[in-house]
Image (tube, rainbow, N blue to C red):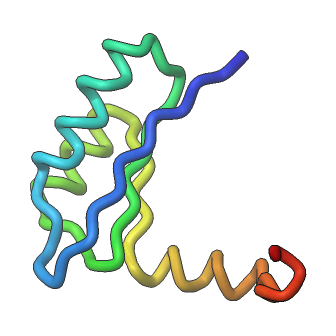
């Protein structure tokens, strides 16, 4: 069974490599198979490089919006 560690950061400023470091550490602690960081912002160059080096998926505001638009949810159906 695969384990995914996800870090979520909401911020107006670009997300630095600390968020990626936290996911890398959590992956080791939980013996996870994959990791990702999701934000409503963007990432610094350092965060992108660290994520690539550790095979961490990064979803910035553009990827998040694109994915949410591809899977619309009607709130009435959730209730």
Q: x and y percent of residue 44 in the render?
A: 13, 66
Name the residue: 17% across, 36% down.
21
Up-down relation of residue 5 to residue 59 (above or below) = above
- Which quarter of the figure is the N terminus placed in? top right
Give the left or right position of residue 25, taking residue 71 as reference: left
Up-down relation of residue 15 to residue 53 (above or below) = below
Give the left or right position of residue 31, taking residue 46 as reference: right
Give the left or right position of residue 53, taking residue 45 as reference: right
Q: Quadrant of the rendered structure where residue 40 is?
A: bottom left
Which is more toward the observer, 50 or 66? 66
- Which quarter of the figure is the C terminus placed in? bottom right
Up-down relation of residue 46 to residue 3 (above or below) = below
Give the left or right position of residue 46, taking residue 23 as reference: left
Q: Quadrant of the rendered structure where residue 54 is?
A: top left
Q: Quadrant of the rendered structure where residue 70 is?
A: bottom right
Q: How many marks on residues?
A: 0
Q: x and y percent of residue 31 in the render?
A: 44, 11
Name the residue: 24% across, 56% down.
48
Name the residue: 21% across, 68% down.
43
Q: Residue furthest right?
A: 77
Which is more toward the observer, 15 or 51? 15
Q: x and y percent of residue 3 in the render?
A: 58, 24
Name the residue: 48% across, 20% down.
32
Which is more toward the observer, 40 or 34? 40
């Amino acid at each position: 069974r695969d384990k995914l560690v996800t870090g979520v950061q909401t911020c107006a400023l670009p997300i630095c490599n600390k968020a990626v470091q936290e996911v890398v550490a959590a992956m080791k602690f939980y013996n996870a198979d994959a990791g990702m960081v999701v934000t409503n912002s963007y990432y610094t160059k350092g965060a992108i490089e660290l994520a690539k080096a550790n095979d961490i998926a990064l979803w910035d505001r553009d990827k998040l919006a694109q994915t949410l638009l591809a899977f619309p949810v009607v709130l009435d159906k959730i209730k």
